[in-house]
Structure formats: structure tokens, C-alpha cells
Image (tube, helix red, strand yellow):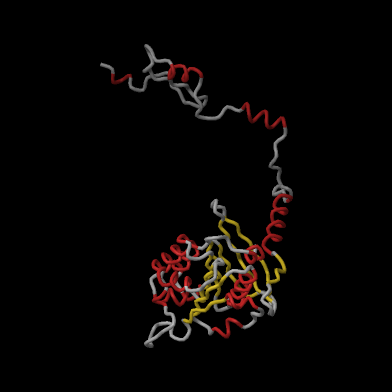
Amino acid sequence: MLTELLQGTDAGGFLLIQDSAGYCGRHLLKSFISAALNREEVVHVLHFEVSEEELTDGFKGSHIQRLHFHNAYTDPLGWTDLPAFTVHHFNLEELAHRMKQTSHSKPVTLVIDSLSWVLRHQSPPAVCNTLQQLRKGGAVRAIIGLLHADMHQRGTVGSVCHLATSVITVAPGMKGDEAVAKLTKRSKSGKVMQDEEVFSIKEDLTVIVQSRPSHVGGRQNEAEEQETDPTANLTFNLRLSDTEREAKEKLALPFVFSREKKTALLHSGPGSGRILYEPDANDDYDQEDPDDDLDV
């Protein structure tokens, strides 16, 4: 699934890369930028955490001409007189205006590095509303955002993930150059697909998918569950023979209405209010009246 996402994000899609202190997702973010440039898309990058020089490290060729940076790294909070871009500029009108300044007619992909900066200084509902307006308003073809999940409350992360059409949660792998990606993709029909893959990133930002541990493990567990018989090693028998099953079916269960009781209940008429008592075999019935001495 990771390879499919790199090949092209659906129009109007929002791809969220979710990382933590254990593994930084910025290198994977740069791989998605490189893939978008190779598709001849125009890429606008809002960078809050690292400089433009660090983000362009690894990009080669003429594709970089379609890469436009909006510098929020120098002054992200607008403390100087002429800030290039700040967290307060993160709204539909400002972003649409800045992206229209380019003369390219190619589809525009908006990259946000990172959403954590914006969420720390704007309310989550306002950020989600801007992202939704960008997706639905046609200002951009696709949005790719990086989010540091361990910097926010669970509800904030859940709101952004719910808005995203694809979520990639990255974590360190078993080897130094490997990482694990847990992927969730929602189709337009509402179907949710999940996967887990081990990947590595080469120097030219090419992503190499090495294995799919969750699929292999899941299939093995399903096969084991189907083959295992829970009654195989018991010291007693849970199965019934044909004779035992026939005897079980003929057994009269307790508290079942007799035919006379059913007839009296289903067909009302004279005597339908009478009390019917069926003596039990173990009843101690005395023919003598114990209260005969009270007769006057």
C-alpha cells in the first residue's frame, strides 16, 4: 500500500504522516515530495521546523523548479516586522492567495512540515476546518502533512486522523535503516483498508518496501485456527453418537406444557379458568382431611 500511495495521492486527498520521538517521518515526507515532483506536480511547502536548505537536500534535477517554499522557519510566530509566513497565515484565503502567485498550470500539492506547529498555536477545530476547505474548495490537488503525535492530546490527533483519507504511522524497525509503517486508507465508498509494511529509504529518496509482516502473520494465525481442533486432546468425549442424539431428542424437558394444558390455554370456553394440577410421582398425598376436626 505504501508504494501505491507514493505513486499518486487521489485528487482531494489528505495524506497524514504520523511520527513520534522514536522515529522522525520527515525523510518519508521528502520521499512523497520527490514522487510528486516526478509526476510533474507543483509542490508548495510550508516549513516550520527545518530550513529550506535541509528540506531540499537530496533533490536533484530540474524538478526542483516546481518546488515552492513558504518560509515559516525563520519567524513562525510573527515576532519581526516582515515575517515571510506564520502560523496565523494558516487559513484558506492566505494559502490560496500564495499558491495562485505561481504561473504554473500544473496540479498543486500542499506539504505542511509540520502540522504540530500550527496545532500548538491555533485551535484544532480551526485547523481542521482550514484543511477541509482546502480539500473541498479546489485550491489544492492534495495535502501531505507531518504530525508529531506525541506532542498532542489523543483527541487532537484523532480529529486530524479522522479528517485524513490516508494515515501512515511510522516507527523504528528492527534494523537501523528500516522502519515500520502502519497504513490506513479510506476509499471514497467508505471502505477502510489497513496494512503494515517494513520499508527503507535510499539516498535518492526512493522508498523500498521490504516486507509485509502483518499480512503474513495474519494468514498463518487464520490457518492455525482453522486446523486446530479444541476437542482433540480432552480426556472425555464431547461428541454424541447417533443413539445418544436420538435419546436426547426424545427426552421430555421439565416445565413443558402437556397437551391438556395447551388445549385449555389456546381454546377458551367454559371451565377455561379452572386450575389444572398434575400430581407428581413423588407427591405425599394423604386421603384423610387434616382439618376434619374444624367442621361444624
Front residue (pair 56, 211): 56
Give above or below for 215 relative to 81.
Answer: above
Q: Locate residue 168: give its quadrant.
A: bottom right
Residue 234 is at least partly visible in this image: no
Q: Position of residue 16 (x, y in %)?
A: 54, 68
Q: Locate residue 247: give its quadrant.
A: top right
Residue at the top extreme?
270
Q: Quadrant of the image for the N terminus?
A: bottom right
Q: Position of residue 145 (x, y in %)?
A: 52, 71
Residue at the front extreme?
103
Q: Position of residue 125 (x, y in %)?
A: 39, 66
Q: Quadrant of the image for the C terminus?
A: top left
Residue 257 is at least partly visible in this image: yes
Tell me: 177 left or right of 257.
Answer: right
Which residue sits at x=54%, y=76%? Answer: 20
Tell me: 44 left or right of 246.
Answer: left
Q: Position of residue 105 (x, y in %)?
A: 54, 67
Give above or below for 165 relative to 179.
Answer: above
* Number of numbered discs overlaid on the protein picture: 0
Give above or below for 118 relative to 280.
Answer: below
Residue at the bottom extreme?
80
Front residue (pair 174, 93): 93
Give above or below for 37 relative to 251.
Answer: below
